[in-house]
Amino acid sequence: MDTTLALIVLTSAVLHPLWNALIKGRDNQRSYYIVFTMGLSFFAFLTALWHGHDFMQILDVWPYALWSLCGQFFYGIGLIYVLRHGDLSAFYPIVRSTPLVVVLASVLFFSASYSLMSLLFIGMVLLGGVILQYRRGKNLLENPRILGMAILALFGTGFYSLADAEMVQRIPASVTMAWVDGINAVLMLVFFTFIDRSFQTTRNVSKILRHHLPFALLIGALGFGSYQMILYTFAQGADVALVSTLRQASIPVSVLIGGLYFREGAILRRFLASLVMAAGIAGILSI
């Protein structure tokens, strides 16, 4: 992978856990995630408008757009549940194990092939991520519902990554984000309103937009900037599996945030796990 593209992906990986931490730190993660998705669409819309892109280009890639929308929706549903009910340090590695889904889907549906060294480096990054977040005595199967939702989020992010990589080869990334994230925000709002049998989620979203607009714009800007970088690398032809693997660098960043803000321990073990991840990332950079 080109070094410049790799640095862009790593920068995106640093931004990713920031908005996750900001949303998790709020009382109503569900409403804030919907606001976050709305922010993504808003900034994408402004970017596409600024560059004079044709929004109707989305019709040229509508099957991929639908595929991406489904992935984004299920990713959001799963991530919201994990943020609300799960131990992030136990389930975050599962949610971020995107390369497993991407490689499997690429081989099964796109006849892609990867060298043994590529798979080895991907495995090192994933192994380091799991060790990094492991806690002694923590049994992931103690709550199968949270585990299932984490796996749902995992497959969601894998599917939308593959779809987005195809779309940005044909139309601008800002157009895809404006449509997909905008529709996704509406779908999640309708879904949770139906689940709650009330308009509480809608009221909460409205309250956030009225009283916490600067915060809403901040998390939206972080998410937009982070994923815009990823879509740019896809548009330049970067391999989806390798990009997804490099994004695993977000895991040690999240550990640093947890250590500094939540006072989490096991620093030595996590440092060693970070070295395993760093070795895998360095190997990917050399391919």
Image: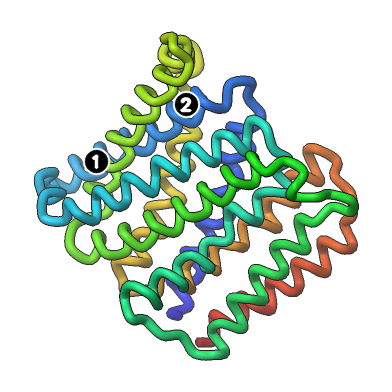
Q: On the image, which quarter does residue 34 sit in? A: top left
**What mark, if any, has residue 83 been given in the picture?**
none
Mark 2 or 1, nearer chain start: 1
Q: On the image, which quarter does residue 180 sit in? A: top left
Q: Position of residue 104 (x, y in %)?
A: 46, 72
Compare residues 2 and 164 and report the one nearer the observer: 164
Asked whether, in this view, residue 5 is left or right of residue 144, the answer is left
Q: Secondary structure at mark 2?
A: helix
Q: At x 49% / y 90%, what residue is drawn? A: 115
> Mark 2 is on which residue type?
Ala
Asked whether, in this view, residue 204 is left or right of residue 69, the answer is right
Q: Position of residue 90 (x, y in %)?
A: 74, 49
Q: Position of residue 71 (x, y in %)?
A: 38, 49
Compared with residue 118, is residue 47 higher up or lower down, i.e. above or below? above
Compared with residue 71, is residue 126 higher up or lower down, i.e. above or below? below
Q: At x 42% / y 48%, what residue is drawn? A: 225
Asked whether, in this view, residue 93 is left or right of residue 154, the answer is right
Quadrant housing the N terminus: bottom left
**Within 10 Å of the Cα at label 2, are there few (<14), some (14-19), or many (20+) other Cα atoms?**
many
Question: How many dots with numbers?
Answer: 2
Compared with residue 137, is residue 30 higher up or lower down, i.e. above or below? above
Colour convention of the picture:
rainbow
Q: At x 64% / y 40%, what residue is drawn? A: 146
**What mark, if any, has residue 216 been given in the picture?**
2
Asked whether, in this view, residue 161 is left or right of residue 18, the answer is left
> Mark 1 is on which residue type?
Trp
